[in-house]
Image: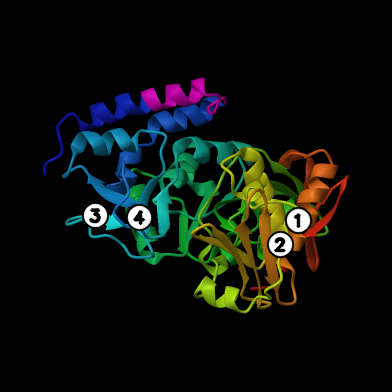
Amino acid sequence: MTMPADLETDAARLRETMAKALAEDGVLADSAWRAAVETVPRHQFVPGFYLPADERDAHGLTVWEPVTAELDYGRWLGAAYSDTTLITQFDGDEPDWKQPAVRHGGAPTSSSTLPSLVVRMWADADIQEGHTVLEIGTGTGYSTALACERLGSADVTSIEVDPHRLEQAASALYGCGYTPTLAVADGLYGYWPEAPFDRIVAACSFRTVPPSLLAQTRPDGKILLTLSGWLYGYARVLLTVAKDGTAEGHLLGGTVSFMSARTHAAPAFGNPAHWAAELPEAARAARHGPERITAATEEAFHLRFLAQCAVPDAQMTTVGEVVHLVDVVTGSAATLTPAEDWWEVREGGPVPLWERIERVLSAYDEAGRPGPQTFTLHVYDGGQHLRHPNLPGLPLPRPDGP
């Protein structure tokens, strides 16, 4: 398909509309970031992507519909300039955008993050002119382009673990006139050749703060990243690095999630029924039900992260009405089964998974249900702890752990 002659005119109009909407929502308070959003042609970075269909398939899986200019020009361009995350890859497999196919289910492994979150991340990192920046997770290159437009390409380094993704992003970036330093690298180890940096911003999530990132940040520099884990609890933190190499910072508010760094992704745990079969028959009444951490609320989003700190190696899945917790590291498991008006808990293995989560939930309630911004993450040699004045410290997994 030959692109319409008025593509650039349509795109410029849609960019202006998107920037205006983001400004009205309070996302673009900085005029320099607004100018970047109005300038960077997002459509150049997303020649193809997937959007979810309105209904699931017969097996309950999400139906992902491919969107390209050839398939539907209006839908493609409109989505490119909407405040939406556009999925560009599933399960590490690069689509054939010349002959894209509908997908049923799958785990997204690359995307163009919604513009409001991209700008929010850059703004929250307190980036100023003259700062050198490392971006972890180039993805499509759109967020990299915004940073280049704002700071100049010479001060921007962006790394991506997927070589094909980086090749596509580099083509789009160079085609638009941006020339940042790009490299195929694992974000877990940062990028020593261009260190030290004034700011490090991660567009993926980590189980813990990688020590290499602290070592590659200048004293008084800042690291903005999202912490997550195998329970898929998320928290963003802005760390300030001290001269002695330690760091600390408050958690940030909001409900933001990013795909896990591939080296920190959850391992497979097999059939939950096999784990449940090994549990003792004796059950007890749960002091807290699983909805405390699974409900679609901002508090549950926060609580899932706190629960995750208590059982960092646990994973959770629901089969029918039964909630399963599985810990592949210690060999522990638990099930929660609904009764009349309570939940029955069965636990086994060296770690009482749900009991540990209940302790955190009870302490959280007794402390007055404090929000994320009241917690401080401390990172030091050999440990990382989340602390609150009215709660016991919650350790994150060891940085050198699985």
Amino acid type shown at disc 4? Leu
**At numbered mark 1, what does the secondary structure look like: helix, strand or loop?**
helix
Is 369 positioned to the left or the right of 121 in the image? right
Residue 308, x across and y down, in percent: 68, 58
Residue 124, horizontal then vertical, whole percent: 63, 38
Residue occupying the point 84% across, 42% down = 367
**What's the CA distance linking mark 3 and mark 2?**
39 Å
Question: Per the image, is 212 magenta?
Answer: no
Callouts 4 and 3 close, C-beta under 8 Å: no
Q: Earlier in the sequence, mark 4 or mark 3?
A: 4
Amino acid on which disc 1 is placed: Glu
The span from disc 4 to disc 2 (Cα, nearest Å) is 29 Å
The answer to which of marks 4 and 2 sits earlier in the sequence is 4
| Magenta-drawn segment | 17-29
The answer for how far apart the CA atoms under marks 4 and 3 are is 12 Å
Amino acid under disc 2: Trp
Task: Say what secondary structure mark 3 lies in.
Answer: loop
Mark 2 Cα-neighbour bin, 10 Å: few <14, some 14–19, many ≥20: many
Residue 27 x %, y %: 54, 28
Quarter of the C terminus within the rendering:
bottom right
Mark 2: secondary structure: helix
Of residue 56 and residue 32, the one placed in the foreground of this image is 56
Number of the label disc, if any, that sits on residue 358: 1
Answer with left or right where residue 73 lies relative to residue 123: left
| Residues under numbered marks 1 and 2 in contact, where contact means CB atoms less than 8 Å apart | yes
Name the residue tied to disc 2. Answer: 354
Residue 223 appears in the figure = no
